[in-house]
Structure formats: structure tokens, C-alpha cells
Image: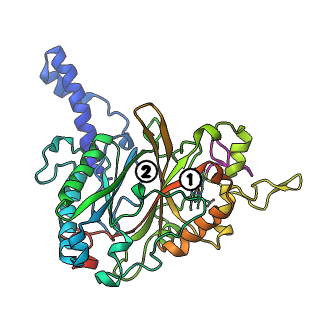
Amino acid sequence: MNPSLGRRRLLGYVGTAVAGAAAGAGAGVVGAQALEETPAEPARPEVLPRVVSPYGVHQPGVAAHPTAVTEVVALDLRPELTRSRDRESLARLMRVWTGDVESLSAGRGTPGDTAPWLAAVADLTVTVGLGPGLVGEEWGIAAPEGFARVPAMKHDRLQEEWSGGDLLVLVAGADATTVGHAVRRLVADARPFATLRWRQQGAWRGRDEQGRPQTGRNLFGQVDGSANPKPGTDLFDTTVWIDRGPWAGGTTLVVRRIRMDLPTWDELTRAEQEESVGRRLDDGAPLTGGTELSDVDLAARKDGRWVIAEEAHARRTHPSTNGGRRLFRKGANYELVGAGGESETGLIFQSFQRNLTGQFVPIQQMMDAADALNEWITAVGSAEFAILPGFAEGEWLGHQLLA
Ligand code: HEM
């Protein structure tokens, strides 16, 4: 965060509160003195809404700490533009979206915005990507290495309405109104070029009551994300970022809409639930001991059996079971409530990796072959996107590929 911005906002907040109290006492001058004399409140920059700069080598939303609200939106390019492989129009859309991203990230409305008051400073990030239909020879856009559609898995029950797409906008932020407004503006501004294909919304508790970052929980109650490579480390960089060619600074994303059967999950004992992953429910620590951030000990045995079961999710997906392959995962819990109160629950699972077929696909196949969680989870949507590299002020999204 920009520290001066955080300080200004904090002062703005304190100032308003003190001024309000002073106005009540009918003494504005006292208010000004009080502002100076009031001992500074402990700074809690984490709980204050922040501006995330849209500029950089990478789009900032990928590595950003998970926010409370995420909307994942797929669009399709208009058929006439697809037929003519109209790169110029695609580039124009990217320039329009670049302007929108700059405004929305700063808490401003977009050009022609009918409700600019809904834009707010709220940790907002917008991440843009291209689907498999827009990369490759036909478009004259080199595909990132290993970028392809995820092959069918035997446990999948994919629905067209949650799958595929030419373009991605992934909007994340601290507040649902701000995020929803950003999505509507981005979709509206894309209208001459592209139409909405699907839109999914989910929530995540990535901060504790004090506003400090924490690993959130999925709807099974599990701490989810503990074994992720940490942003800013070499491991993260080699797992996530493409490091050469026109996509350098970009990555690839798989979005899976995964239904979770909570009623049958609830029938399990706590021990059964914990064994299905190999980690404790209360704090996310491995069943082999340690704390949330400890690695699972896949060699540990008790009474002649593996402590982390053969089919436990943490064993099936562990790097040592998968030739050292890793992913950077993010989640957003969804609950789609129908008119009669029936609800569908699940996880909008997002996996970022440098090489989709080299990393994601083998791990997903390992899981599909035999993972204890398969009994309670079903992928109902799936889509792949190549996430564009970042851009600097004065540049536009995708200029490395489309200029
Ligand atoms: C609703 C579906 C899923 C649930 C509830 C779930 C839950 C979990 C939980 C609780 C953990 C342990 C904590 C952590 O390290 O994050 C975990 C780890 C992991 N999951 Fe999942 N997961 C799901 C889907 C997937 C999918 C589709 C993949 C990839 C194909 C995947 C890959 C991984 C990986 C790579 C790890 C880290 C393993 C390690 O390094 O120890 N998960 N998951």
C-alpha cells in the first residue's frame, strides 16, 4: 500500500469523527485542537480500504491477497469480429478496458458511468485474460506454452452455462456493491465488441476480525490455501509467472465451478472429514502435526497405516505425488439461492500456473483418478484463460501481444 495514502485516509477518518463530536458540542475550533491533541489511534491500515495500483509487470489481482468479494466474468467476442479475426477491434476493447481499470481501481466512475458514486476505493483489482479461442495462429497471437483446454475428467458434470469464454474479467474487492458496479461497467463498455457469457460471484473471508490477512475457509469449513506458494517468493514466481516471450509477466488461469454437497458432507464424523484431506478442521494443521503452514508428512505411519490416507486430498495434490508440480489457488465460496429457498453451494476454484498442461492438468487428473473429496464435489463449470501481462502508466492491457 502507498503509506501516505493510508495515513491520509486514517486522518480523514479520525478528523470526521472528531469534527462530528465537536459539532455536537457546538465548538468547531475545539474540534481542530482535539484533532491535534487526540493521541493517534493505533494504525490499522489493513482494515482501511486501499487503492491497488493497476500498473506493474503483472496484473496486480493475481498475487493480491484474497478479498471479500470476487466476480468472475466470461464474455464472447461478437461473431462478426471472430469471423474476421479482427485484432484491431480486440486491441480497441483492451484500450477501453485499460481506461476503465485505471478509473475503477482509483475509486472513480468510468466514462459515461450513470452511477459513478458506486465506484469506491475498495481493494479493487480487475484481471483480464484471453480464452483459447483468441490465442493461436489464426489470431496471430502466440499461445503461452502449454495453454490448452482442460481435458474431460470422469467426475465432471460440466454445464455450458458455466464453461468456456473468449475473454475474462476477474474483479475482486472488499465490497460487493463496488465489485458489482465495476463488472457492470466493464461489460457495458465491452458491448460493441463482446457479449456476456457467464458471471459468477463468490465470497471469501481472507481477513480476521482485526482486518489482518488470514487463510480463508471453504464451505466444508476447511482452511483452504495454506500450502500455496507465497507471493513475492521465488517459488511463487516460478509456479505462476511466464518469464519469456510476449506473455512474460502473464500467467494462465483455470476457473472451475465446483459444486459441494454439504448435506452428505455433514453426515461424516469429524475424523472422516479431516481424513479426507489430511488436515485438521480447526486450524488447518496436517494430521501429522505442526501448525497451519506446516507441510504434510506423507511418510508418517500409525498402526501400520498412512496417517495421511492414500486418497487424502493433500496427498493426491501434493507436489511430491505430482513430480514437483505446484499451483497457486484462490477460492470464492458461492451459494446460489433459488426462489423456494433451495440453494446450490460450492467453490469458484481458481488455479494460476505458468504452464496449464504442464502443471494443472496432471494434478487434476491425479485428483480425478482417486481423491477422497470426489464423493462430495463435482465440477459443473470449467474455463481456461491466458492472463495478460501487466502494463505501465501510458500503456494498455495486451499491448505486448496486440500492438
Ligand atoms: C471444492 C473443491 C476443493 C476443495 C474443498 C479443496 C480443499 C483443499 C484443502 C482443504 C486443502 C489443504 C489446505 C491447503 O493447502 O490449501 C487443499 C490443498 C490443495 N488442493 Fe484442493 N480443494 C478443492 C479442489 C482442488 C482442485 C480442483 C485442485 C487441482 C486440480 C486442488 C489442488 C490442491 C493443491 C495443489 C493443494 C495443495 C497440496 C499441498 O501442496 O500440500 N484442489 N485443497
- Position of residue 238 relative to residue 218, above or below, is below
Tell me which corner region of the image, top left, top right, bottom left or bottom right, holds residue 203. Answer: top left
Q: Residues within 10 Å of mark 2 (few under 14, many from 20)?
A: many
Q: Which residue is nearer to you in this view: 35 or 280? A: 280
Region in magenta: 279-292
Q: Amino acid at mark 1?
A: Thr
Disc 1: residue Cβ within 8 A of ligand 1's nearest atom = no
Q: Position of residue 53 (x, y in %)?
A: 28, 58
- 78 part of magenta stretch: no
Residue visible at 18% across and 76% down? 88
Identify the residue position indicated by label 2 in the image. Answer: 66
- Secondary structure under the numbered disc 2 in the rendered image: loop
The residue wearing badge 1 is 378
- Residue 252 is left or right of residue 193, and the answer is right
Q: Is residue 329 left or right of residue 49?
A: right
Q: Nearer the viewer, mark 2 or mark 1?
A: 1
Q: Is residue 290 magenta?
A: yes
Q: Position of residue 245 (x, y in %)?
A: 37, 83
Q: What residue type is disc 2 on?
A: Pro
